[in-house]
Image (cartoon, rainbow, N blue to C red):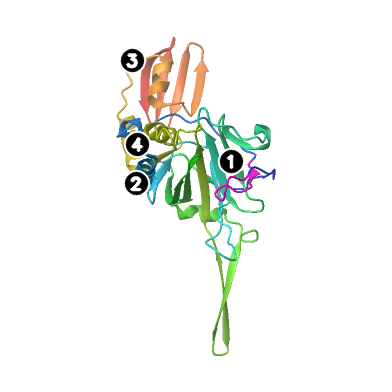
Amino acid sequence: MKITLRFPRFIRRAAAIASLVAITTFGQTPSTSGDSHLMASSAASYDELKDLLKNRYDGKVVVAEVSGLFAGEQKKLLFGPGENGVYWSHFASGAQLPSKRASDLHQLDDNTFGLLHAGLNVTQIEKGERLKVYKFYVTSDFVQLVLTPTSLEHMRDLDMSRASKETTTTTSGHNRVQNVSVAGFGLVFSFHFKKGAIKDDHDYAAIVQEINKYLLPESEAKEVAAAKQNVEIEPGMTEDQVIKALGQPLQTVKFGEQKTLKYKGMTVILKDGKVTDLKVE
């Protein structure tokens, strides 16, 4: 899969946010899920909030809840572990939006922007894909998850001619062997909140609810998926009720007074705006 990139510059936020470049493809607006697992509305202190969030995310596997995300090659550096190629920044209600014009950035939705480092390979993250949180940070301004895809299939998107490489040479007698290694893919997702929400309000529930829209812990994602599998579609339901239960259809076909909503594995048939039949494929 080839993706065209442009390269504007963005703000730097401390050591955690780097300058990035925009993706040209646009994504979709996410929906809320997984709120049933919120155990507390607020932490007693900033330190307790950090502990709660760390226990929830650090080292865990999360599932992408939206389409339109990308990961970038983890660029190798001379010193240190390297640097992730793609950075995402989400600005919750009340948080200050980036000063850079939205038209110059990749806009996932009204409050979420993604950028990449120039010259690196990229790969698309599918909705429902598993991502490992291998670094996690909480600051007074934002919560940041550093993620890597768990599927090795993404390596097919790695163009070796453009990849960031590391070459090592080993010598044994008269033989010299060169080994070339490349990094995998990674992304950084930072969630920015209104001033005081993290440091002063310790609003754990609001923070988790916002992150859930984009990244949901694997165990909760499985429960959400299981609940969707048990949805009941009954004759007489309206189109809005079907969409609320099953989500947006893959395709909608209208023929006279009849409309079909095509989903993966099934087709819902409506007449005069009401469900009359359902075909499982």
Q: Nearer the viewer, mark 2 or mark 4?
A: 4
The reply to whether the C-beta atoms of the residues labelled 3 and 2 are less than 8 Å apart is no
Neighbor class of circle 3 (other Cα within 10 Å; few <14, some 14-19, many 20+) is few
Residue tagged by mark 2? 55
Q: Nearer the viewer, mark 3 or mark 1?
A: 1
The reply to whether the C-beta atoms of the residues labelled 3 and 4 are less than 8 Å apart is no
Q: Nearer the viewer, mark 3 or mark 2?
A: 2
Amino acid at dot 3:
Pro
The image's mark for residue 114 is 1
Residue tagged by mark 3? 235
Amino acid at dot 1:
Gly
Q: CA distance from mark 4 to mark 1?
A: 30 Å
- Which numbered disc flags the more N-terminal residue, 1 or 2? 2
The image's mark for residue 43 is 4
Q: Secondary structure at mark 2?
A: helix
The image's mark for residue 174 is none
* Residue 188 point in image, percent of width and height: 52, 47
Q: Nearer the viewer, residue 91 or 108?
A: 91
Q: CA distance from mark 3 to mark 1?
A: 43 Å
- Which numbered disc flags the more N-terminal residue, 3 or 4? 4
Residue 20 forms part of the magenta stretch: yes
Q: Main secondary structure of the magenta part?
A: loop
Q: Residue at the spot x=42%, y=22% of the render?
A: 243
- Which numbered disc flags the more N-terminal residue, 2 or 4? 4
* Residue 198 point in image, percent of width and height: 44, 36
Count of all numbered marks drawn on residues in the image: 4
- Which numbered disc flags the more N-terminal residue, 3 or 2? 2
Q: Nearer the viewer, mark 4 or mark 1?
A: 4
Q: CA distance from mark 3 to mark 2?
A: 45 Å
* Residue 53 point in image, percent of width and height: 38, 42
- State the extent of the magenta-drawn residues as a range: 12-23
